[in-house]
Image (tube, rainbow, N blue to C red):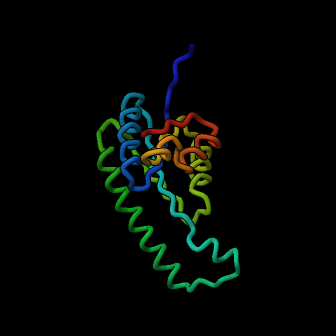
Amino acid sequence: MRSTKFERILVAVDGSENATRAVKVAVTLAEKFNAQLIICYAIQTPFRSFAQNGIAVPANLLTDYLSAAREDAKNILDKVTRSAGTDRVKAVRAVQENVFSVVEAIVNLAEKRNVDLIVIGSRGQSGFKKLLMGSVSSSVLSHASCPVLVVK
């Protein structure tokens, strides 16, 4: 069996506890393999269903939403970058703006950057829903062309 070498690891973040756990795992792997860590945050296009139904959305509402989303992304990425901030991890940020599908944004970025591994958090639920994986993590797992590690 041949040894696996990870040179580029993408971790998808959204500010959740599961994403925080995924970051810890991704940082550990990046340190171990001396890999570049790509921290991905996707800003989903809002009001998609309105646009599809021909309902106009005021421009200022969209501008306010995107401004707030960018600020959230910056705060989350600052926090994640600090937590990854060891001398042994080369971390870069990748904000994907105005995407219709978070899954597509993650998978496309992984392909574009020749990522060797995607690390993503699972959805935290209780009871019966605990048996089901989150829709984003499940879809990334299904559509990515590289290995995917889902962190609980």
Is 37 left, or right, of 143 in this rendering?
Answer: left
Report which quarter residue 91 is drawn in. top left
Which quarter of the figure is the C terminus placed in? top left
- Place of residue 22 in the rendered image (x, y in percent of width and height, measured from the top left): 41, 42
Give the answer, above or below, for where 48 lies relative to 1. below
Report which quarter residue 75 is drawn in. bottom left
- Place of residue 8 in the rendered image (x, y in percent of width and height, measured from the top left): 50, 37
Depth check: 55 or 10 in front? 55
Give the answer, above or below, for where 11 lies relative to 66. above
- Place of residue 55 in the rendered image (x, y in percent of width and height, measured from the top left): 66, 83
Which quarter of the figure is the N terminus placed in? top right
- Place of residue 73 in the rendered image (x, y in percent of width and height, measured from the top left): 41, 62
Report which quarter residue 46 is drawn in. bottom right
Q: Residue at x 54, y 46 (%)?
A: 137
Depth check: 125 or 21 in front? 125
Give the answer, above or below, for where 32 lies relative to 77. above
Is 37 left, or right, of 139 in this rendering?
Answer: left
